Amino acid sequence: MPRPVTPLELKGISKSFGGVVALQDVDFTLEPGEIHGLVGENGAGKSTLMKIIAGVHTEYDGTMCVAGKQVRHHSARSARAAGIGMVHQELSIIPELSVAENVMLGAQPTTRLGLIDWAAMTRKATDYLRELGIDVDPRATIGGLPLGLQQLVEIARVLSSGARIIILDEPTSALSPPEVEVLFGLLRRVRLGGRSIVFISHFLDDILRVSDRITIFRNGRRIETAAVAYVDKAWIIDRMIGAGHRALEESYLGEIALDSRPSAPVVLETQGITGPGFHDVSLQARAGEVLGIYGFMGSGQLELARALFGKTRLRAGQVILKGRPLLLRNTAQARRAGIAFLPESRRSMLFAQEPIYKNMSISILGRISRLWLRPAQERAIAAGHVKHLQIRPASVDRLLGTLSGGNQQKVALAKWLTHLPQVLVLSEPTRGMDVGAKDDVLTIVKDLRAKGIAVVVVSTEPETILSLADRILVMKRGTIVHEFAAETVSKDRLLAVA
Ligand SMILES: Nc1ncnc2c1ncn2[C@@H]1O[C@H](COP(=O)(O)OP(=O)(O)O)[C@@H](O)[C@H]1O
Ligand SMILES: [Mg+2]
């Protein structure tokens, strides 16, 4: 019997963005009918390689063969024509259109007059969705559906396009556990048809369950490819981190002693709370303690943080502040109760067109007006913060919008130093910051802790959690799966339970 032709073969792929080397001399092959898992830390080069395969990046060194023939895509369209379909990390559905239209996008059946054949389109999409086991009304407007369903529909679109090579870049981060099951069932069926799938995920359990082979990337290089039957989670983490890299290894294996304070009074408590994106979460945040909540992207921790501030309604359970049950119907109630929140998108909390001093006092305006504080006093308070927090440039009159992200974050935090809340919830407090700004932000958070506030830090960055937290809860698929307290913990142990 002739050996089936290799669907995809890349050799010696290198790619740089300006001075940043994203990929270095990477070989990669896909077998017919395999699910190939791709793992590696953020920035390892996974998405870049997939975008080269899908014709998004056209400038690179090295060669690519599709079904035995050397190709050089000049666009995503030419890659699609060669049978390559990709679901990107960012969804590309059109929210205003129906499910059926989205599934058939770019391949709508037409009548003899060249018009879109709506009946045929709905029928085809319905059949297709049923075949894939996706339970959704094809006539529904897609933008109104839960994110997980939108993602499944997008995947259905790529599958229905007839692609022989299907790339899924972190498709499970928005999916609920039953939706993940639907996706896996669907991938296994697609594989039976001899098509090949690349599956990128941070969820190593998922990768181990569904993949035939796995490739590990680190720092732009392919480290190893192996049959999944022969590997386990520890083996993968080992290669993701890279034993032998002294400095890196230390940051992973370095043991951090958690300074948990089990006797400090509980300020905030949740009992079995459930809301959009998380379920059955019970936790306690204590005075003068930083409670870190860690999880991969899409584990529900950002949603939990929003709910603690009354941004989304709870469906079950309750929140208790200093022994009193709280009715969190909206953010104003949370604020009055003494809960402060700094969301992952700082822009929504700050006023770019206002000077620094206004941004620092806006949260305390109520207090200022009561005390008849004059603008001069307002500015004096702000000047103290600007100096103490080393905000650059050091002028209270600078418009906030002209500051770097790190300095904006310091301004946002300064508000809470003037008017101490009982609980401060920080969502991704260091995301997108350079090392210096990160360090300053960490110092401010420690100051706030020292003032006796219960600080809850929610983050997908292990370094941030490890350098701040006195106690760590790990979230996975919307619920808490592990607690680290009064013990030592390292980055690899944190990743291993996530
Ligand atoms: N469009 C781009 N412009 C500049 N740098 C980029 C671009 N895309 C990726 N990079 C850089 O290339 C490296 C690899 O990124 P990426 O492939 O997205 O990693 P991964 O998907 O494994 O997290 C990173 O250092 C990233 O910052
Ligand atoms: Mg990526």
Image: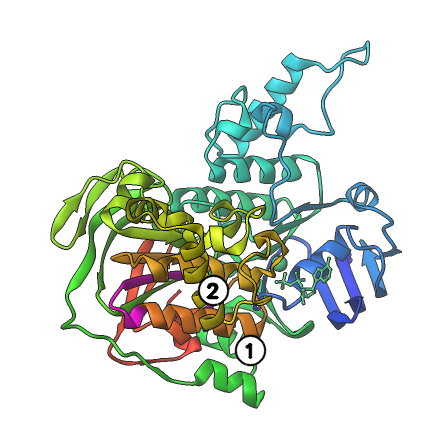
Q: Amino acid at mark 2?
A: Ala
Q: Amino acid at mark 1?
A: Arg
Q: Residue at x 82, y 9 (%)?
A: 113
Q: From the Cβ of disc 2, is ligand 1 less than 8 Å away?
A: no
Q: Quadrant of ligand 2?
A: bottom right
Residue 231 appearing in the image:
no
Q: Which residue is mark 2?
A: 383
- Real-space CA distance between mark 1 and mark 2, rounded to the nearest whole angstrom: 49 Å
Q: Is residue 196 left or right of residue 63?
A: left
Q: What SS does tag 2 mark?
A: helix
Of residues 377 and 320, the one drawn nearer to the viewer in this rendering? 377
Picture quadrant of residue 127: top right
Q: What SS does tag 1 mark?
A: helix
Q: Which mark is residue 239?
A: 1
Q: Residue at x 62, y 35 (%)?
A: 93
Quarter of the picture holding the C terminus: bottom left
Magenta highlight range: 449-463
Picture quadrant of residue 198: bottom right
- Above or below, 62 against 127 in this view is below
Q: Residue at x 42, y 55 (%)?
A: 378
